[in-house]
Amino acid sequence: MKQLITFCLIAMGLSFGACQSNTKKETATAKEETACTGDCTKCEKSAEAKTVATTEDAGVYYFHGDRKCKTCKAVGAQAKEVAETLNVKFFDINFDEDKNKELAKQFQASSSSLYIKSAKSGKIEDLTTFAFRNAINDTPAYIEKLQTVIKAELQ
């Protein structure tokens, strides 16, 4: 019984840390993500910065660390796809790199997060909880909600 409890505690600890980076929590240059041919961090790090983000820019902001779990990858990939389909800016921001420390602070993003910055009002809508709950478990609901919020706030 003690072994089972110990195993459960270890499993819970690993699952909570799956989306967190082992490195110091710092941020990266905000850049509009470029098309990647594979699902790897090399592609993300080598992508050319097209647009440097500021808190003035409206669009979809996806914050993540160097390591991404399956859910983090799904949230980012689907958000990027919806943003491209609706022709709005998508910012893929690695907060483990130094260059976006201030931007992540402004959005209060210290873990994987998804925000929509309104073009109309300038308000920031936090879709993180909904996105991570549904990106894999209920993909159609996630995509529908994302499209609805983007259309209301960015078009």
Image (cartoon, rainbow, N blue to C red):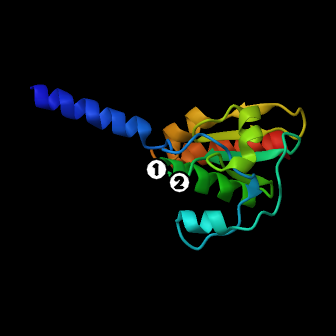
Mark 2 in CB contact with mark 1 (< 8 angstroms): yes
Residue drawn at x 61%, y 35% as measured from the top left: 110
Is 101 positioned to the left or the right of 77 in the image? right
Residue 22 badge? none
Can you give x and y, in whole percent of width and height, for residue 60 in the image? 74, 47
**Which element carries disc 2, helix, strand or loop?**
helix
Can you give x and y, in whole percent of width and height, for residue 131 in the image? 57, 40
Can you give x and y, in whole percent of width and height, for residue 52 in the image? 83, 54
Residue drawn at x 89%, y 32% as measured from the top left: 121
Residue drawn at x 65%, y 51% as measured from the top left: 79
Residue 152 vs residue 16, the one in the foreground: 16
Q: Residues within 10 Å of mark 2 (few under 14, many from 20)?
A: some
Q: Which residue is mark 1?
A: 69
Q: Note whether 37 is above or below 14 in the view shown.
A: below
**Which element carries disc 1, helix, strand or loop?**
loop
Q: Residues within 10 Å of mark 1 (few under 14, many from 20)?
A: some
Query: Residue 46 lies in what quarter of the image?
Result: bottom right
Q: Which residue type does callout 1 highlight?
A: Cys
Can you give x and y, in whole percent of width and height, for residue 66 in the image? 55, 52
Q: Which residue type does callout 2 highlight?
A: Lys
Residue 120 vs residue 72, the one in the foreground: 72
Q: Which residue is mark 2?
A: 73
Residue drawn at x 90%, y 37% as measured from the top left: 120
Position of the N terminus, as image quadrant, is: top left
Is 96 positioned to the left or the right of 21 in the image? right
